Amino acid sequence: RVIRNFYDVLSTGGYLFLGYSETLWQISDDFSLREMDGAFVYQRPPSPSEMAAERSVGAGAIPVAVPLRRRVISAVDRGRGVGRRLPARRVPTLEEATAFYESRRFEEALLAVEGILAADPGDAKAQLLAAKLRADREEVGPAIRHCRRVLEIDPLSEEGYYLMGILLMRAPDGGDAGEYLARVIYLNPAGRRSALAHFHLAGLHADVGEPAAAVREYRSALRLLERFAKDDLVEEFSADFLARVCRRRLEELGGV
């Protein structure tokens, strides 16, 4: 209701500026996302009744339905463009959103990816990037919803299953984290994410008092990690670091 009130009191073409951590994603579709010199804001488009009134004015009818605030515009305001419908801005590209993300400009990345998804909710790569951005902000619920959409669009998304598994591990009840991590291994048994999937599965087994299963998964993770160069990155960790953690966990569990 608050956002709808903002829409009602703004003139057509007026802007809504939100805080750096705020978004209208899944709250309101009334506003259009606009880019301004690399930043993104929300703009109020005309309502259907206002568009009908404008068409009537263009046809010579008396504009009785046009709100007073749209007709009382000073000459100074006209010079500044206040009250005019501004041209639609282009939809950001996934490459731009990804570049923002990789340069750690996360708020700009989030606004860009929201603009992409507003135009095409079926973009699996944009949904995945939105999930990562939400996960980085510890917004687990929204991140999980984006991940579910990724897997609806692309049921073979290895990265989608991995991120979903990690997110469910952060959820209060853990959910079906193990099931999603197991699917990563099924899709790419020799991949780097599979090494991490084995690693996290081992931790899940250890947490619920299943040391034999934990040992099995740590050994599987270690076998994969030893295939990579020591300084190869597995997500944000080096293969050597993860291998050393696996060996230490195996010693603690008596599995060496």
Image (cartoon, grey):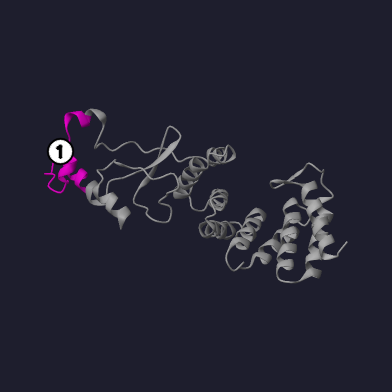
Residue at position x 24%, y 48% from top? Answer: 9
Tell whether position 67 is magenta. Answer: yes
Vertical placement of residue 91 versus 175, above or below: above
Horizontal side, residue 32 vs residue 85: left or right? right
Give the quarter of the figure containing the N terminus: bottom left
Horizontal side, residue 180 vs residue 253: left or right? left
Where residue 156 sits in the image (x, y, percent)?
65, 57
Magenta-drawn segment: 52-78
Along the line of sight, the residue nearer the viewer: 20 or 225: 20
Where residue 144 sits in the image (x, y, percent)?
55, 59
Along the line of sight, the residue nearer the viewer: 123 or 109: 109
Residue at position x 59%, y 69% from top? Answer: 173
Residue at position x 46%, y 44% from top? Answer: 111
Residue at position x 44%, y 49% from top? Answer: 118
Residue identifier under label 1: 72
Horizontal side, residue 16 vs residue 55: left or right? right
